[in-house]
Each structure stands twice: as C-alpha cells, then as structure tokens.
Amino acid sequence: DAMVIQNPRYQVTQFGKPVTLSCSQTLNHNVMYWYQQKSSQAPKLLFHYYDKDFNNEADTPDNFQSRRPNTSFCFLDIRSPGLGDAAMYLCATGDGVGQPQHFGDGTRLSIL
Amino acid sequence: EDQVTQSPEALRLQEGESSSLNCSYTVSGLRGLFWYRQDPGKGPEFLFTLYSAGEEKEKERLKATLTKKESFLHITAPKPEDSATYLCAVQGMIGAGGTSYGKLTFGQGTILTVHP
C-alpha cells in the first residue's frame, strides 16, 4: 500500500544535541510537509517543500531545518533541541491546493 | 489569517447515541475543508474533503456537512471503536509568504469517547 513512513517512531535526545527525523513516501506526491504537534494541541505547520522549492513558515524557529534530497524522502533537522521542542513531529504529503494531505504516524521526540 | 475553532473540546457518548461535532472557520477563499481522525500516538487519518456550502459526504456512521461558516461531523449510532480525536482543517487561498501549496490550518480537535 502507498504510504508515508516516519522513522524512528520514538526519539530521545539530549538538550542541545542535534537530531534528525526522517520521512519517506510511496505516494509520489509533489509536496511534503512537516508539522509539530504538542500534547492536546493542533498540528502546526513548520515548513513544506513543493518539489525542491522550500517554504518556511514565518514563525518557525531557525533551529529547525529541512532537506529533501529527492521526491521520496524528506528530513527534519533540529540543530540544538530545547526542552520546548519535545513534541510529536508529523510528516505529510499532498498534491497541493484542494487536495487532502496524508500523514505518517509521527515521531515522538523527547528531550533529556 | 485563517482560523478554525472546534466544539465541544470533549464529548462522551453512550454506544448508539447520535451526536454532532462542530467546526467554525474563517478563511480567505476556501479551497477545501478537511476532516481527520487521530488515534492516540498516531498521525491524522483522512476522512473527508468538502469544497463548497451545501456539500455533504458520508462514510459508514459519519456524515460531514458544510456551510459558509461552519462544518458539522454527524455521528450516527456510534460504536466504541469510533472513539478518537476528530480534527477539522481548512485550506485557504494564500499560505505564508504568498505561496499556497496546500497549507492546512487545524482546529484543536474534539476528543470523542464512546462508552459501551
């Protein structure tokens, strides 16, 4: 089945230690999105790629970066995680305006 | 700025007790309103897309409707397996930076619990 896969499902890192989360898709969608979801809150868009065109949300901290080496893969890099970055990180794919986004099961990030 | 408000925050039902969830929205040029289901520890699962006022979509015990200001998710004769958080999201004309590649603005969700 075509799907969105996130690895790892759970990630524990130390305060200030860089961490990378990965996402892959078999849906062949043009757009890949990264959302942050904290407990009992709505998912919040961090940034997205349309093909190789990167679009950052205005309030996304500089600490968060992303890479998309090809259509299938996208990475979220957190350069110096703080305690406030502990959250579920959701990757989604879609074909753009008017189309639903399809989500992976997320990576739960904990900061020690 | 697009905004979405869902009510109630939490809803407890007995099995078989029908009810509705509300999603009120303001958006600059609606391109789509989306309903998702989210189980604990999982990503949102797509349910429905609605594009224009008066549109309705159905899937098993769920029916979604849309007006110019709100959407309802009606649950008929719910079962315990319908227990989940239901998220509503809108997609407007313009995203951040003037580009629009399908950015979704989500509501806080309604936590539905169905007791046997």
Image (spheres, coloured by chain):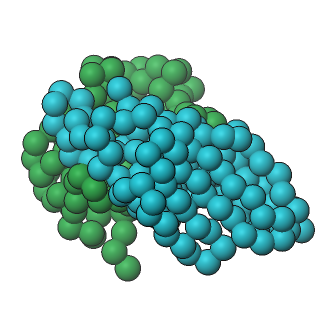
Q: Position of residue B96 (x, y in %)?
A: 24, 30
Chain green in the figure, letter: A
Residue A41 in which image quadrant = top right
Does residue A74 show up? no
Q: Is residue A68 left or right of residue B24?
A: left
Q: In the rendered view, would you say A67 is above or below B72?
A: above
Q: Position of residue B40 (x, y in %)?
A: 65, 53
Q: Residue at x 48, y 41 (%)?
A: B69
Name, please, the residue furthest toward the left: A52
Q: Is residue B70 left or right of residue A32?
A: right
Q: In the rendered view, would you say B104 is above or below B47?
A: above
Q: Residue at x 30, y 35 (%)?
A: B28
Does residue B94 show up? yes
Q: Position of residue A99 (x, y in %)?
A: 29, 59
Foreground residue among B28 and A67: B28
Q: Is residue B88 left or right of residue A65?
A: right
Q: Residue at x 78, y 72 (%)?
A: B77
Foreground residue among A11 and B113: B113
Quadrant of image for the N terminus of chain B: top left
Q: In the rendered view, would you say B46 is above or below A46?
A: below
Q: Position of residue B97 (x, y in %)?
A: 18, 27
Residue A40 in which image quadrant = top right
Q: Residue at x 78, y 55 (%)?
A: B113
Q: Colour of chain B?
A: cyan
